Amino acid sequence: MPQDTENAMRKDPASVQSERRVDDLSGMIPASAREYIAQYMTALKLQEKESEKLAADISLWESRVTMSRSRGMEELALQAEKEAALIRSRKSALDADIDTLKIQIERMKKQLPLLASRARSVDPDLLEQELLMAAGHLPGDEEKAALERDLKALEKDASADAALAALKMKMGKDS
């Protein structure tokens, strides 16, 4: 059983749930999250290289076992088998860590779009000020802009009312 699991079992369940998981990126900005994931990917690559090295070591010790047995050196073969078994167990533990890292990295990668969408949220006050400036007003002229909008709406209503009245008169004359 991994040591982390044993430690988690000794703690009370409430404290285990309150701890933040290493693959939880909530609260991070996208750039920091990408950097955090890159660190995990670097660790993964280093562990994969170490696993390859251990696989080569296992092959070496297995060939030594075969060679020792072929020469009739059974005691030496037993020692080589012990060394190969020790390296196999280290490789097995390392491979389990590699699998865990891969899962954590995938979980973190899946969170990146959500973080990016949260970062793109719009500041309504800033947007309003930018629209005012685009309309030719200075920042802080919200009241003046609102008054102009209201006046334009009244002018539009008045012109629509005048056009309607003219149409009614024309229809009244024609009939």
Image: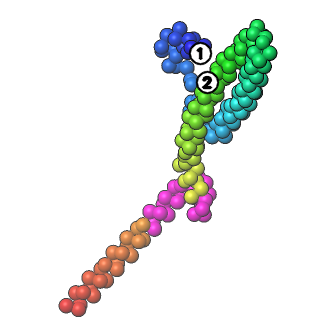
Residue 2, numbered label: 1
Query: Marks 2 and 1: in contact by CB < 8 Å?
Result: yes
How far across and how far down the image is residue 65, in percent? 75, 17
Quick check: 7 above or below 174? above
Residue 96, numbered label: 2
Residue lying furthest bottom: 174
Quick check: 66 above or below 140? above
Of residues 27 and 111, which is closer to you in this image? 111
Q: What element carries label 1?
A: loop
Residue plotted at (73% across, 29% down): 52
How far across and how far down the image is residue 159, in percent? 39, 76
Displayed quadrant of residue 114 = top right
How far across and how far down the image is residue 49, in percent? 74, 30
Left or right, 129 with respect to 50, comes to: left
Q: Which of marks 1 and 2 is nearer the N terminus?
A: 1
Q: Between marks 1 and 2, how big is the CA–CA gap?
A: 10 Å
Viewer-nearest of discs 1 and 2: 2
The quadrant of the image that shows the C terminus is bottom left
Amino acid marked by disc 1: Pro
Residue plotted at (74% across, 20% down): 66
Displayed quadrant of residue 166 = bottom left
Residue lying furthest left: 175
Amino acid marked by disc 2: Ala
Q: Give the range drawn in magenta.
A: 132-152
